[in-house]
């Protein structure tokens, strides 16, 4: 059953409510995480908690719990939900303040952990491979709000996603303002050429995905060459294979980008291999 922990209290979907004066709602002032549990085991909880605290530190938001407490709250919420396979959404906002923007008016952060399930695309889309278009909305400049902060400001990614929806695509590809390739609306990108896997590096305007890290490890262990390098749309169009990675999306093969069919136009052998190894890893 969907279960919510909010500021020390247990709630359900109907009773979990935030104030209209919460700066998370008024200004998108806050941070979040997206985590999965497989067969009752939370995948890389430590990495997600570390990223949550780094995001909070970057925006000078103090989480009123230690990392250990936060991890324990997340584990307890999963246990209480009874869901063996779950999607976990910790959200920390600046808290309740007044109608001004000044965060000093918010004495206490709002802490929420939601445990529910998620499905990004239908099984048919995974089987066929995703259709992708490049969005014209760029990734926000890293010196404005770092893309590495998993903040409650997802409007650029949402606007990009709307462009994809309007084009009838399954997903979008976002570029940095300079034009180099970054990521999807909530997933990192990998391309395959020969036996080499390439994904854009930290400074390409990406969120440093936990799934991305896992796939980098899996790729190395499997004996592929694995690179973090800047790529352009040309590299994507001419790749043998391409796939997205993300906690919600897992490993999702890409079939077509901006009308260019990628490789054979279906999940290639290396994508299938990475997918199988990933599913084994999360259940190990
Ligand atoms: N880039 C961005 C911008 C993200 O939000 C990822 C990459 C992948 O990171 P992980 O750590 O999950 O491998 C994310 C993930 C969704 C959804 O509906 C995805 C995310 C957040 C909210 C919703 O797919 N974040």
Image (cartoon, rainbow, N blue to C red):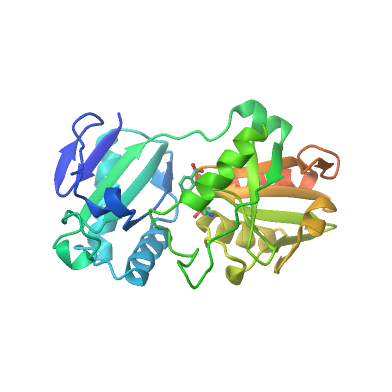
Q: Quadrant of the N terminus?
A: top left
Say which of 170 and 224 sits in front: 170
Numbered marks: total:
0
Residue at the far front: name it. Answer: 100
Q: Position of residue 120 (x, y in %)?
A: 53, 35
Say which of 213 and 159 sits in front: 159
- Residue 284 in sight from this viewpoint: no
On screen, 51 above or below 192? Answer: below
- Residue 138 in sight from this viewpoint: yes
Say which of 235 and 123 sits in front: 235
Residue at image position (31%, 51%) is 91
On screen, 179 above or below 10? Answer: below
Residue at image position (57%, 58%) is 214
Q: Position of residue 64 (x, y in %)?
A: 19, 63
Say which of 23 and 121 sits in front: 23
- 108 vs 56, left or right, is left
Residue at image position (42%, 49%) is 34
Q: Position of residue 199 (x, y in %)?
A: 68, 61
Q: Position of residue 163 (x, y in %)?
A: 61, 41
Residue at image position (82%, 38%) is 265
């Amino acid at each position: 059953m969907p279960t919510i922990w909010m500021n020390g209290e247990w709630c359900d979907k109907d009773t979990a409510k935030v104030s209209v004066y919460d700066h998370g709602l008024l200004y998108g002032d806050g941070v979040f995480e997206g985590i999965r549990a497989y067969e009752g085991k939370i995948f890389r909880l430590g990495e997600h908690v570390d990223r949550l605290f780094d995001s909070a530190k970057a925006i000078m938001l103090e989480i009123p719990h230690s990392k250990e407490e936060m991890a324990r709250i997340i584990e307890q919420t999963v246990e209480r939900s009874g869901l063996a396979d779950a999607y976990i959404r910790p959200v920390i906002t600046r808290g309740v303040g007044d109608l001004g923007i000044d965060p000093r008016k918010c004495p206490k952060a709002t802490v929420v952990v939601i445990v529910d399930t998620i499905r990004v695309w239908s099984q048919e889309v995974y089987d066929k491979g995703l259709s992708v278009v490049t969005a014209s909305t760029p990734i926000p400049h890293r010196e404005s709000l770092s893309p590495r902060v998993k903040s409650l400001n997802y409007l650029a990614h949402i606007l990009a996603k709307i462009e994809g929806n309007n084009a009838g695509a399954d997903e979008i590809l976002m570029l940095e303002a300079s034009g180099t390739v970054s990521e999807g609306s909530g997933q990192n990108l990998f391309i395959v050429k020969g036996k080499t896997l390439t994904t854009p590096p930290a400074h390409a305007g990406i969120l440093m995905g936990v799934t991305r890290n896992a796939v980098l490890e899996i790729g190395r262990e499997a004996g592929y060459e694995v690179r973090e390098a800047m790529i352009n749309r040309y590299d994507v169009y001419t790749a043998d294979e391409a796939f997205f990675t993300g906690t919600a999306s897992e490993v999702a093969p890409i079939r077509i980008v901006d009308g260019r069919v990628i490789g054979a136009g279906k999940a290639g052998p290396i994508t299938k291999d990475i997918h199988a190894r990933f599913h084994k890893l999360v259940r190990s």
